[in-house]
Amino acid sequence: MHYVSVEGLTKSYGITPLFKGISFNINEGDRIALIARNGVGKSTLLRILSGKEHPDAGACKIHKDVHLVMFEQEPQFIETATVTLNLFNQDHPTMKAISNYEMAMESEDEDLITNAIMEMEENNAWDFESKVKTILTQLNIHHLEQPVSKLSGGQRKRVSLAKTLIQIGFEPKHVLLLMDEPTNHLDLNMIEWLENYLEQEKVTLLLVSHDRYFLEAVTDEIWELEREKLYSYKGDYENYLEKKAARIESELASIDKAKNTFRKELEWMRKQPKARTTKSKSRQDNFYEVEAKAKQKIDDSNLQLDMKMTRLGGKIIEAKKVYKSYGDLVVLKGFDYTFSKGERIGIVGKNGVGKSTFLQILQGITQPDSGKINVGETIVFGHFSQEGLVYKKDMRVIEYLKTFAEQFPLASGGSLSAAQFLELFLFTPDKQYTYLSALSGGEKKRLQLLTILFKNPNFLILDEPTNDLDLPTLAVLEQFLLDYAGCVLLVSHDRYFMDKLVDHLFIFEGDGVIRDYPGNYTQFRILEKSKQSYTSVSSDISSSKEHSVASIEKKVEPATVAVEKKVVEKMTYKEKLELETLNKEMPVLEEKKAAYTAQLNNTNLNYEEIISISEKLTEVNAALDLAEVRWLELSEKQ
């Protein structure tokens, strides 16, 4: 069944077209990812499909039986209304019954609850109410009587996502779900739950996202908006990269051929007399087509990151017995750690456990209740915060940059003017005179990154840096960070980004406990899932050496079973990246294992030191066992 038919769609802002004459169809069961550089029209295309914007030209036909549900980056609410009223703001008996039931349960009024239960019974709303409860619980949405105007940015996004998911469960059979960056402001557990939920619902989906693992899990086709055209690629993200590279190579060859033809035809045109025959008129028309082809340019320019890092001294940061609480919320409880040169640490934990506070304490922005943070004299922090670009008044991009400096030093030597430096970050000369308020979310992120790197930091703290950045920019940022010689602390919900960059993790477990895990996020999740599968295994794996080994063997067992059951003929893009990461991580784990073993052989250790090192050795052994099992599985596929 055709859900959507689009013919010759064109949209421009000013003189620059976002897309021109594009055509496509969306059929029932399609699961499509829409990707492009920032500012070329992804969100605009979704809004046109949903009827919230109108094209300059072309036709967009939606089947009369199809219901469109749209999740936007900037959610719209009735600001004075409660969360409940916003979630269930639909004129339907079932939705009204659920709304009244939720409000009655919040009020704890027995009469209201009794009436609400009767209304639920009359409308057979219990099954749907159960699904609603699951959605609200998984997205950590509570206090439903709170006004929406009091919610934080992240809470607003989660409420908007909940409303969208509730709507697709409630709507008729034929639903087209449009989603614009749904994973922003979700923690990692929420993203994994959302992947499973969308898979179970089997909705027809058009999705804009920069999260490559998420794209891999929920879509099977990729559309790319580029140079005013729409290109379609069946298959996963890896297939898209291969097919795109082949397409560009073919286009470049075609342009070279056109240039050769153009030179010959240009010479013929110059020799032609003014009075032309019909035959020469036909050749003349063809000349202009060849000329247009020959002068075509493929702009595949990427963001260029180049900075002169401040020298890193011997002392980095030492945290000694650091405590921090806000009332009943314990953020840190005796945190003890000495940072080393070149460390890349990922920070993982649910929203609200204190990750951002921890980053502020390290930088001296927030003071701990007790303990010490000793920062080396040479340390220069570069903090990429979730707050985004901060400016007091609206001004043009180049004016804003000049408030920092007129010249910018480069790692390769020399310096660049503000205008030249902006061009490295893909701000064209005309874009440099755009007002800050008119920039897209991704363009603001790029400008924020530019102002941070200008300070030449040697200790980067990146708090959700991937939000709103397009995939080409993310790829360049990843490569820059891989080559970066300083320290990196990374908070990100982007699992691909995390897996590629970090050496180990700080796991915020709540109640001030931070666990140092020797591996990346995917390895950590494999270990956690194996623990959940075997709940009978004691969580205290350090009580004795024999008990520790037995626990690890049991924990590795479910991963082994999964390997035997799962049959995949071809490695996915995600699996190839995972194998590449394992090849780097396993030697590091082996080194740590050898170091901890050597420490245990030291007869001068006291009891507490032996227990501490034993715990670390146990964790390293567990991670190494799981890594080896996964490596064997992936190697066989390769």
Image (cartoon, grey):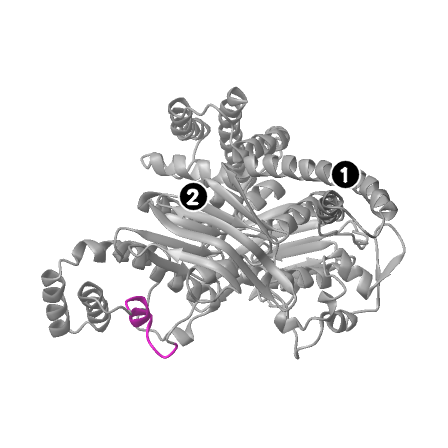
Please tell me which residue is depicted at 71% across the width and 49% down the height of the picture. Answer: 299
Q: In the rendered image, which quarter is residue 103 located in?
A: bottom left
Q: Which mark is residue 474?
A: none
Q: What residue appears at the point 74 percent right and 66 percent down from the top-left corner?
A: 430
Q: Nearer the viewer, residue 326 or 299?
A: 299
Residue interval drawn in magenta: 79-88
- Mark 1: few/some/many CA within 10 Å (<14, 14-19, 20+): some
The disc at residue 256 is: 1
The residue pinned by badge 2 equals 218
The answer to whether one can see residue 509 in this image is: no
Q: How many marks?
A: 2
Is any part of residue 170 visible from this angle?
Answer: yes
- Residue 555, image quadrant: top left
Q: Which amino acid type is marked by label 2?
A: Val
Identified at 76% across, 44% down, the residue is 280
Question: Residue 178: horizontal and vertical position, in percent?
Answer: 42, 55
- The question of residue 394 being in magenta is answered with no
Residue 422, percent across and down?
76, 61
Q: Is residue 354 left or right of residue 162?
A: right
Look at the image and tell me in which quarter the N terminus lies. Answer: top left
Residue 368 pos. (x, y %): 58, 65
Residue closer to the observer: 65 or 116: 65
Query: Which SS class for mark 2?
Result: helix
In the foreground, 634 or 423: 423
Q: Is residue 80 magenta?
A: yes
Three-letter amino acid code of the residue under disc 1 = Asp
Q: Is residue 497 above or below residue 633?
A: below
How far apart, in angstroms, are the residues tagged by discs 1 and 2? 39 Å
- Quadrant of the image containing the C terminus: top right
Residue 315 is left or right of residue 211, and the answer is: right
Q: Residue at x 83, y 39 (%)?
A: 264
Q: Earlier in the sequence, mark 1 or mark 2?
A: 2
